[in-house]
């Protein structure tokens, strides 16, 4: 690629990719700079553009990367490398003009499409409270319970969706000849699953090391060696990010 192009590293994922709590706070410039993606950007002399946000789903990650390219990418002036840290496949979202303020809880996002606020983010361990001041959201808790039942009863379907997201983004990157690396930060999908294994060979394992191997995901691989940095959230500290960065470099960066 031409040397005059701006060298960018796009970093997308959830709070684990964002390095949350490395310095004891949730989101900070320090945390993102010392996350495995931030370290990779520094190592390769690329400008980091941080898209990671806490508590989001794999569909959010996919959509946000696509939206960044739709709104910002110029192949004539930019040399982009993407780091994608997939999150837990049990997370979900539904389109709903709920008016969430994602940036207020993730103040060090570098680029954010406002349309991402118009989704309701769902986790089995957390409920958005009812909002009696808005009639359409007065029964929000009951609505979420219905979705939680589906998410809890059909984890295999959630894994299939996340596997398909990875294939979709892989195809997108290759269509643009954009270099990238994908990793799992939590339990995403298992390529030994009877529903995923017939298609597992479609994954480019050179660009997605240890895809579909939950024990090799960032958190589960390092949580015993490097305990959580807080009691409230399952985040790992700077040492774990440093080691994961080194692992990625050894596999992908030449």
Image (cartoon, rainbow, N blue to C red):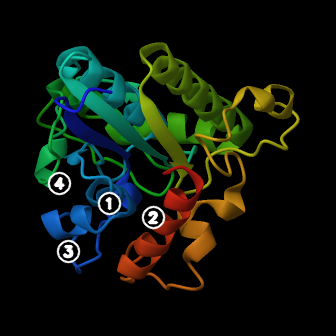
- 245 to 162, vertically: above or below: below
Residues 228 and 4: in front is 4
In the foreground, 167 or 20: 167
Marks 1,2: beta carbons within 8 A: yes
Task: Reply above or below: 227 against 249.
Answer: below
Dot placed on the residue nearer the N-terminal end, 2 or 3: 3
Residue 105: numbered disc: 4
Name the front one of labels 1 and 2.
Answer: 1
- Judge left or right: residue 52 versus residue 89: left
Distance, label 3 to label 1, CA atoms, is 24 Å
Q: Is residue 236 above or below residue 179?
A: below
- Disc 1 to disc 4, C-alpha distance: 28 Å
| SS label for mark 1 | helix
Say whether marks 4 and 2 touch (CB < 8 Å): no
Q: Which residue is mark 2?
A: 245
Spot occupied by residue 37 in the image (x, y as percentages of width and height): 35, 55
The percent coordinates of residue 116 (x first, y second) are: 25, 29
**Front of the two marks 4 and 2:** 2
Q: Badge 3: few (under 14), some or many (20 or more) residues near its Cα, within 10 Å?
A: few
Q: Which residue is mark 1?
A: 43
Upstream in the sequence, badge 1 or badge 2?
A: 1
Q: Earlier in the sequence, mark 3 or mark 4?
A: 3
Residue 235 in view (yes/no): no
Measured in 3D between alpha carbons, the distance from the residue under mark 4 to the one under mark 2, in whole angstroms, is 25 Å
Q: Give the alpha-carbon distance from disc 1 to disc 2, as whole Å.
A: 10 Å
**Tally of numbered discs:** 4
The x, y position of residue 254, in whole percent, is: 50, 51
Q: Mark 3 against mark 4, which lies toward the viewer?
A: 3
Q: Mark 1 or mark 3, which is nearer the start of the sequence? A: 3
Badge nearest the viewer, 1 or 4: 1
* Tag shown at residue 25: 3
């Amino acid at each position: 690629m031409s040397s005059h192009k701006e060298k960018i590293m796009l970093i997308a994922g959830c709070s684990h990719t964002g390095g949350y709590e490395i310095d004891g706070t949730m989101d900070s410039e320090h945390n993102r700079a010392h996350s495995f993606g931030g370290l990779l950007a520094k190592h390769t002399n690329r400008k980091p553009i941080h898209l990671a946000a806490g508590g989001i789903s794999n569909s959010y990650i996919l959509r946000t990367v696509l939206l960044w390219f739709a709104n910002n990418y110029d192949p004539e002036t930019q040399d982009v490398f993407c780091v994608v840290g997939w999150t837990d496949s049990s997370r979900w979202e539904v389109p709903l003009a709920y008016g969430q303020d994602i940036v207020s809880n993730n103040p060090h996002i570098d680029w954010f499409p406002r349309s991402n606020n118009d989704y309701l983010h769902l986790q089995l361990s957390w409920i958005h409270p009812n909002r009696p001041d808005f009639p359409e959201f007065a029964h929000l808790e009951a609505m979420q319970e219905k979705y939680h039942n589906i998410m809890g009863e059909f984890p295999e379907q959630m894994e299939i969706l996340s596997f398909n997201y990875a294939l979709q983004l892989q195809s997108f990157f290759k269509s643009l000849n954009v270099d990238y690396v994908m990793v799992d930060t939590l339990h995403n999908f298992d390529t030994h699953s009877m529903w995923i294994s017939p298609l597992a060979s479609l994954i480019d394992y050179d660009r997605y090391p240890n895809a579909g191997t939950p024990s090799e995901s960032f958190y589960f691989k390092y949580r015993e060696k490097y305990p959580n940095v807080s009691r409230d959230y399952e985040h790992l500290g700077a040492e774990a990010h440093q080691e994961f960065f080194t692992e990625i470099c050894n596999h992908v960066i030449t």
